[in-house]
């Protein structure tokens, strides 16, 4: 979870276990800021600037599955990549971060615990009557 101790730093997001190849979609409308690869860290990753004011970081995407590019506009629910285990992942999962003030923009930008946002988007946790 968020803030868990790691070797020399603390975990800046939430890890969501899922099968290799499960689609990862944009949580909100926005635009893609970055797509890149870090062999010894995030693997294939994407950064989205959300229309809600947060930046979102999606890491460990499956090799060859990233279907967006920098400066591309995206809609909520639009596919971004598939769950993978690239980089320093020990198994398939999505590493997901939410940032205030931009993703690694300057000293004032910082990650927040994305769990409340994830729970607010989880339609399976919302009673069917409330979804109507």
Image: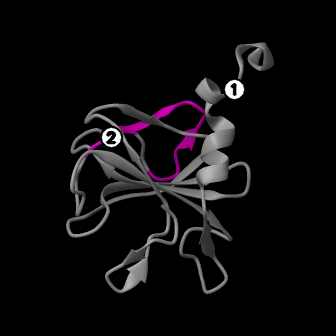
Q: How is the image coloured?
A: one colour
Q: Is residue 107 within the magenta segment?
A: no
Q: Main secondary structure of the magenta part?
A: loop
Which of marks 2 and 1 precedes in the sequence? 2
What's the mark number on residue 79? none
The x and y percentages for residue 78 are 52, 31
As drawn, 53 above or below 67: below
Does the stretch in magenta take in 74? yes
Instruction: Categorize mark 2 by other alpha carbons within 10 Å: few (<14), some (14-19), many (20+).
Output: many
Q: Residue at x 28, y 38 (%)?
A: 65
Q: Secondary structure at mark 1?
A: loop
Q: Nearer the viewer, mark 1 or mark 2?
A: 1
Q: Nearer the viewer, residue 33 or 59?
A: 59
Q: Which residues are magenta?
A: 70-84
For the question of whether residue 39 can be seen, the reply is yes
Q: Quadrant of the C terminus?
A: top right
Q: Is residue 98 left or right of residue 22?
A: right
**Residue 28 appears in view:** no
Residue 83 has which mark?
Answer: 2
Tell me the tag on residue 126.
1
């Amino acid at each position: 979870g968020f803030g868990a101790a790691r070797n020399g730093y603390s975990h800046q997001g939430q890890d969501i276990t899922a099968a290799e190849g499960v689609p990862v979609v944009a949580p909100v409308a926005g635009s893609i800021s970055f797509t890149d690869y870090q062999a010894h860290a995030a693997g294939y990753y994407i950064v989205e600037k959300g229309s809600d004011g947060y930046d979102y970081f999606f890491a460990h995407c499956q090799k060859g599955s990233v279907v967006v590019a920098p400066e591309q506009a995206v809609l909520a629910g639009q596919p971004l990549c598939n769950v993978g285990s690239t980089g320093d992942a020990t198994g398939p999962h999505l590493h997901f971060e939410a940032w205030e003030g931009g993703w690694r923009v300057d000293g004032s930008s910082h990650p927040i615990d994305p769990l409340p946002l994830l729970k607010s988007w989880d339609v399976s946790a919302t009673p069917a009557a409330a979804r109507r």
